[in-house]
Amino acid sequence: MVTRSASPESDDDLADWLRLALIPGLGAAGQRSVLAAFGLPGQVFSASRRQLAAVVGEALADRLRSEDPGDAIDTHLRWAREAGNRILTLADPDYPRALLDSADPPTLLFAKGRIELLARPALAIVGARSATPQGMANAEAFAATLAGAGLTVISGLALGIDAAAHRGALDQDGGTIAVIGTGADRIYPARNQQLARRIAEHGLILSEFPLGTAARRHHFPMRNRLISGLARGVLVVEAAIGSGSLITARLAGEQGREVFAIPGSIHSPLSKGCHRLIRDGAKLVEGAGDVLEELGWVGSAAPAPPAAPNASDPDRHLLSAMGHDPVDVDTLLQRSGLTTDVLSAMLLAMELDGRVARLPGGRFQRIL
């Protein structure tokens, strides 16, 4: 049992925590085992080899007695002294209670940005990396409304739905946390570097991995348990069968969190994961108000949803003919009765206005 301190650790104490976390092969479970047996890290390193071996075996006991990653510890301590950076230990009063009470809390959390966001009620928004334009618009709109209502929006800084959710929350008060699968000094994917800088300035970037850790496939399921563990619930916007977002939703259910899903077209592969979640008991939601109502949330007044751009009668006719599913040009010609030249000009204008998205295969989909 680790005792929580009344204030953040000194450099000496933090150095002991870092030394424990950087022992090769020990892992979070092994770290928690020796902490439960001996107390704080300083007491772990004062234990005899025999005592340590009784808890983690002889090989790891030898490493605990002999390994001294001094240079790496110094690197982490220097990083922690930089403005906006913190390393939270299990004993730190700012370590999030929701994770502390979970089955697999990380020994250390590396945080960059607004640490106070960890104490605020939060909702996770996750979904497909190869999201549709409508899916990203939904994620951004939901995130903006939820952040405006006072909830922190958590996601994983991936392309697609994750990035859209972060952007939507940043457009409100910056109440967003990006839980990443690399070290806090690295950003993956590289295309989200600018977004990550905005989050570090106005929100929070959080990682359980030591500095310098590169992206590895098995890191992302580990990251997902933190996304769900920090939140009151998880909203899945778009997800194919087998998507990592479904792992996050499953973990949320196991952690006693609410699971929400947005339904979509029966023809879209990116709706099938959400439909499966709904069949399995996830709450079907059509607007952010459904989420707030289910959570019983009474926070700040939510902003009104964005109004659709003014549309002329011909535009409305074309949008009605388009429907809400992706559609090809031949089908649109048949439904609308327009000529090819007129239809092409209207589609281009709507695409430039952000009302219609061009999809692979020559198809189009309305966004608003």
Image (cartoon, rainbow, N blue to C red):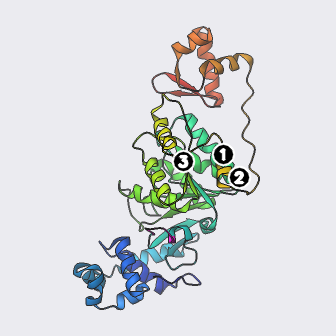
Which residues are the magenta region? 100-105
| Residue appearing at x 42%, y 48% in the figure | 244
Tell me: 199 left or right of 217: right
The residue positioned 35% from the left and 56% from the top of the image is 218
Q: Residue drawn 36% across and 72% down?
A: 29
Residue type at mark 3: give it: Ala
**Of labels 2 and 3, the one closer to you:** 2
Question: Which secondary structure lies at badge 2?
Answer: helix
Q: Position of residue 366 (x, y in %)?
A: 60, 27
The answer to the question of whether label 3 and label 1 lie on touching residues, with beta carbons closer than 8 A, is no
Mark number, residue 163: 3
Amino acid type, mark 1: Asp
Q: Secondary structure at mark 1?
A: helix
Decide if residue 160 is in sight here.
no
Viewer-closest of 316 and 74? 316
Q: Amino acid at mark 2?
A: Gly
Where does label 1 land, which residue?
290
Q: How many marks?
A: 3
Q: Which mark is residue 101?
A: none
Write the residue at 40% across / 65% down.
212
- SS assignment at label 3: helix
State the residue position of label 2: 148
